[in-house]
Structures are given as C-alpha cells and as structure tokens.
Amino acid sequence: MNHVAPSPEMSASLALNPEQFASADGQKINLIGIPREQLADMLEERGHKKFRTKQLWHWLYWQGVTDFDAMTNLSKDFRRQLADEFVIERPSVSEALNSADGTAKWLLKFPDGNEVETVHIPEADRGTLCVSSQVGCTLTCKFCHTGTQRLVRNLTAAEVVGQLMLARDAFGEWPTPSDHSRMITNVVMMGMGEPLYNYDNVAAALRIVMDGEGISLSKRRITLSTSGVVPAMRKCGEELNVNLAVSLHAVDNDTRDGIMPINKKYPLEELLDACRTYPGVTNARRITFEYVMLKGINDSDADARQLIRMLRGIPSKINLIPFNPWPGSDYECSSARRIASFQSIVQDAGLSAPVRTTRGEDILAACGQLKSESQKMRRSERDALAAAHLAAQVAAQD
Ligand code: SAH
Ligand code: SF4
C-alpha cells in the first residue's frame, strides 16, 4: 500500500484555531480535541520527535488516561514538560442521570456557563451515544424545541469528542475494548444543534473517534443527522464518509418551507440530489430519512405515496418519529391509526419504516428542569426533549 504524507494544504485544512485548545481555567492547553497532525506539529515545535505523537495518542485515546504520570513508557522528563504546558480534560458533568429503562444522560456545563446534553441508549445488541454539536441551533424548524433557543455557540472539537470520552469514563470503557464488549458501539450526531453548521469541529472530533489507534469506532457505526445543509453534505461524505441521516419531514417544497426554513435555501430537489450522490451510499449502506409525523401537515396517504416516489433510486430507510408537542408549538402528533396507515403504505413499497417509542423520559424531565433552572418543566416540554433523542434510537438500527 502506498502511504502518502498529507500535503501542506491538507494539513492546513484539517488544522483548528489553537485558541480553542485552552484548558477550562485558561492557563494551559487541553490536549483533547487537537487533530493528530496538529498535535505532531506542536510537539515538533517544542523539540520533541514526531514519533512521540503516536505514544501520546495511545495514552490519550486508547488508554483514556487523564494523568501524565500514568504514561509509563514516556520519560519522566518528557512527562514533566507535558504537564507544565498541557492538561487532559473532559467536559464537566453537572448532572448524571439514569432512567429506569437503562438510558443514561449527562448534562454538561462548560466554563462559560453553557450547557448541552449527551444521552446513552442501551439496546440488546448495541449502545448508542447521542452527541450534541452546538449550544442551541440557528435553524428554526417549527416543530423543534431546540429551534426556539438562540444559538449561543458552536462546540469545540474537544467538547464534541469529550462527550464520548466522559461516557466511556462512566462505563469504565478504557482501554478501548473490542467491538463486542462495548457499551458504546454507535455514535449519532443527533443531540443539540446542526452538526454541518459546525463542520470543522465536528469533523475533527469524528476523525479522532474513528482513529484506529485510539477510540477506534468504525465510520459505519457513526451517523450524522442534518436538516439538509446541502453544500456540506458532499464534503462530509468525501472527508468523513460516516452514515448520513436527513431530517426530511415533508414531501413537497411548500410544506417543507413552512416547517423547516432551511428548505428555502436548499429545496428538496437539491437535497435529494445530494442524497443520491452521497459518497459511499449503497443498498448495504442506506441513507436514513427522519420523518416527524405532524397531524394534517405531512401524514396523508398521498404524502406516503409521494415519499416512495421521491426516494426512488436512493438507497433509503425511513424513521417515522411521532411528534412530541411543546408549549407554543403549532402542531399535533398524527393519530396512531394515521401513522400505521402511512407506515404500511411505505413498507408495502419495500422500504423499512419503523416507528419508535421514547425511552428515558423520566430522566429527560429531570435534566430539563436543570436546564431551565427557574422554570418548572411541564409534561409537554419533557416529551419534546425526549423526542429529540428518539431519532438516536432509530438511526442506529441496521
Ligand atoms: N439538527 C440536526 C440534528 C438534530 S437530530 C437535524 O435536524 O437533523 C434530532 C431529530 O429530532 C431531528 O430529526 C429533528 O427533526 C427531530 N425532532 C426535533 N423536534 C422534534 C419533536 N418535537 N418531535 C419529534 N422529533 C423532533
Ligand atoms: Fe436545529 Fe435540527 Fe432542531 Fe432544526 S431540527 S432546529 S436543525 S436541531
């Protein structure tokens, strides 16, 4: 096999702004989240041999240590130099909750006070971690609770990969175990935010997650969900080639314009084209289309038939998500009978279209209370929060 060193342009495009590497107290540099090539350059600039990167990487992402003293094959001198300038940090967990059904949830609080959530959903044959990419979201999908929150900021690469690392800390999942014994077998970028509007940081984090000498999670076990940021979809496919989930939610432009304003920028024809040409899509590796069931909006039999037509030629699976209302939302969930009718039309055409039920509702409620602090969370708000994680369960299904 031909091993080609990355070109300078390539390294530059993978590099992140070093300002975001600051530790929580701003005094040192957090090693977590720094792209591998950039870490190698940083060590070299400090007079260390490049091969040290491989050793350090192994301690950070294979062994998962947080203390330089544990790095026993590095000289004491080197360890001291590292400790003088660097730290190995995870995001701070302000609340860890466990649902009666086994779902676990961590509320993370960053030094600037911003908070996001990470959720783990265990199932018989897999464990899926639902990871956030932004604090809030700039898009304002009408059915989404996150969409009503102002975007506060993008998460850094360290904050994205840190969500997975702290979950592995919690499960004692270091050093990196074999696929079979892992609690976290799948990652879905389906928490808060639009991952393709924070592409560089999400890409850097996922490259670290996929690195075979570290966390070592296959691209086939990673799913990124997008509302349809068309120009970034191809890039994501070419550079990361993770599984793609698309929040479709409507079968004509008028309806989609009304519920997802991003459709005015990237209408259905462009979105479906980007799906059709998504790198690596085959029948064995299909695109997941998320479809929220909204009463009287997108749930008729004619909509189901149109869905089949429009997905022709695209290797697809469809996740039907019952809408969860929240205070101020303009929609209702379709009836169980309507969902069943929609589902059977889609399935009769040979497409997989599971409907999922919510898990971990009891703890989502508790976390919601923490997020809104002064506000008591109502039942409907709890449901809305739960809904955001529904897709996580379904996207990870093969
Ligand atoms: N921003 C990305 C990632 C979020 S994933 C995206 O939009 O794809 C969360 C999934 O939950 C998305 O498919 C979203 O459309 C869906 N969702 C949001 N609010 C919902 C609600 N109230 N009921 C059901 N599903 C909802
Ligand atoms: Fe943002 Fe996704 Fe919610 Fe739309 S559905 S507002 S893109 S998080």
Image: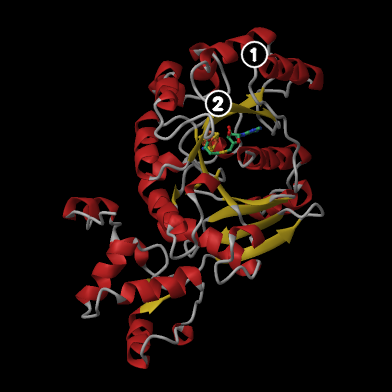
Callout 1: SS: helix
Could you tell whether 211 is left or right of 222 in the image? left
Residue 324 occupies which quadrant of the picture? top right
Q: Residues within 10 Å of mark 2 (few under 14, many from 20)?
A: many
Q: Is residue 338 above or below residue 114?
A: above
Q: Is mark 1 within 8 Å of ligand 1?
A: no
Which residue is more in the foreground, 84 or 148?
84
Name the residue beneath numbered marker 2: 316
Which residue is more in the foreground, 3 or 281?
3
Could you tell whether 393 is left or right of 227 in the image? right
Name the residue beneath numbered marker 1: 304
Q: Residue at horizontal 73%, vertical 46%?
A: 377
Q: The C terminus lies in which quarter of the figure?
A: top right
Looking at the image, is mark 1 or mark 2 earlier in the sequence? 1
Could you tell me residue 397's position as x and y percent?
64, 39
Could you tell me residue 351's position as x and y percent?
63, 22
Residue 358 occupies which quadrant of the picture? top right
Q: Is mark 2 within 8 Å of ligand 1?
A: no
Which quarter of the rendered image does ligand 1 occupy? top right
Q: How many marks?
A: 2
From this viewpoint, which residue is outermost toward the left? 8
Task: Name the amino acid, label 1.
Answer: Ala
Tell me whether circle 1 and circle 2 mark residues in contact (CB < 8 Å).
Answer: no
Q: Residue at horizontal 53%, vertical 31%?
A: 286
Callout 2: SS: strand
Q: Residue at horizontal 73%, vertical 17%?
A: 344
Residue 279 in view, yes or no = yes
Q: Residue at horizontal 38%, vertical 76%?
A: 55
Which disc, if any, is residue 374?
none
Task: Name the amino acid, label 2.
Answer: Ser
Q: Is residue 63 above or below residue 371?
A: below
Residue 26 in view, yes or no = no
